[in-house]
Image (cartoon, rainbow, N blue to C red):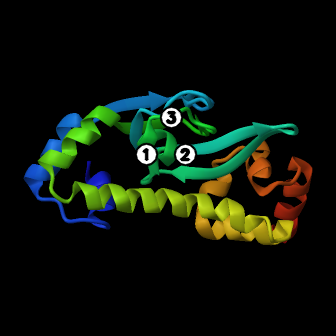
Amino acid sequence: MELLKNFLGQYVSLSQAQFDTLEASLREMELGAGDYLLREGNICRTICFVREGTLRVLHFDQDGEVTRYFIPKGNIAVLPDSFRYQAPANENIQAVTDCRLLVLRYEDLIKMYDQIPVWTRLVQKLHEEVLQQRTLGRTLGSRDARSRLQLFNEEYPGLIDEIPTKILASFLRISPLELNRIRGELTQ
């Protein structure tokens, strides 16, 4: 819980009693690599904190799967519009590695507004954090493949060795073969 407490502490100051109220509403969940937390078309009914592992947000187009961004340990996993409006999601959330999550249901989040005065500000800050995660995928489009890989390493330190080549290549919008070639050049 310390990881969650430190994460939330970046945005608001919660008293121990407020944190205890939140903690009482959280449930633990485990996903195996490849399992889906949320599938496109379903409603995002939870907001999750990643305790261990890495998730990805992806969608499918005419060329197959496209990874939009990654959600590593110590971050929030949610599709904001689907969660906020309780509307069908237009993306998927999938575990890239085995994951352990802390899960807060939508109904419990709504109750928190009455129980924790700073909750509105916290939810707004978390929403901004998720939007920031989404920005990297858009930034990559204007760069060459080598620069995209270098930016990935800056934004997600240490993840390059955890993520399967096919998934990382889909995020970088290059072929797995090209990714391996660039990796080889960068290690020389």
Report the mark closest to the observer, 3 or 2.
3
- Whether residues under marks 3 and 1 lie with C-beta atoms below 8 angstroms apart, the answer is no
Residue 148: % across, % down: 77, 67
Q: Which residue is painted at 62% across and 63% down in the image? A: 135
Residue at 78% in and 48% down: 170
Query: On screen, 165 above or below 10?
Result: above
Residue 106 location, quadrant:
top left
Question: First in sequence: mark 3 or mark 1?
Answer: 1
Q: How far is disc 2 from disc 1 in space, using C-alphas?
A: 7 Å
Please state which of the two labelled residues, at mark 3 or mark 1, is closer to the viewer.
3
Label 2 residue SS: strand
**In the displayed structure image, the side of residue 3 where residue 76 appears, left or right:** right
Q: Name the residue carrying label 3.
A: 87
Mark 3 to mark 2: distance in Å?
25 Å
Disc 2 target residue: 54
In the rendered image, which residue does mark 1 sit on?
50
* Kind of residue at badge 1: Val
Callout 1 environment at 10 Å: few (<14), some (14 to 19), or many (20+)?
many
Element under label 1? Answer: strand
The amino acid on which the numbered mark 3 sits, given as a three-letter code, is Ala
Q: Residue at x 20, y 39 (%)?
A: 111
| Residue 175 visible in this rendered orientation of the protein | yes
Choose between 61 and 56: the one closer to the eye. Answer: 61
Is residue 79 in view from this perspective?
Answer: no
Q: Residue at x 45, y 62 (%)?
A: 128
User: Would you identify the image quadrant in which residue 158 lies?
Assistant: bottom right
Residue 173, image x, y percentages: 82, 54
Q: The C terminus is located in which quarter?
A: bottom right
Q: Answer with mark 3 or mark 2, whichever residue precedes in sequence.
A: 2
Comparing 37 with 120, the one in front is 120
Q: CA distance from mark 3 to mark 1?
A: 23 Å
Q: Position of residue 66 (x, y in %)?
A: 75, 44
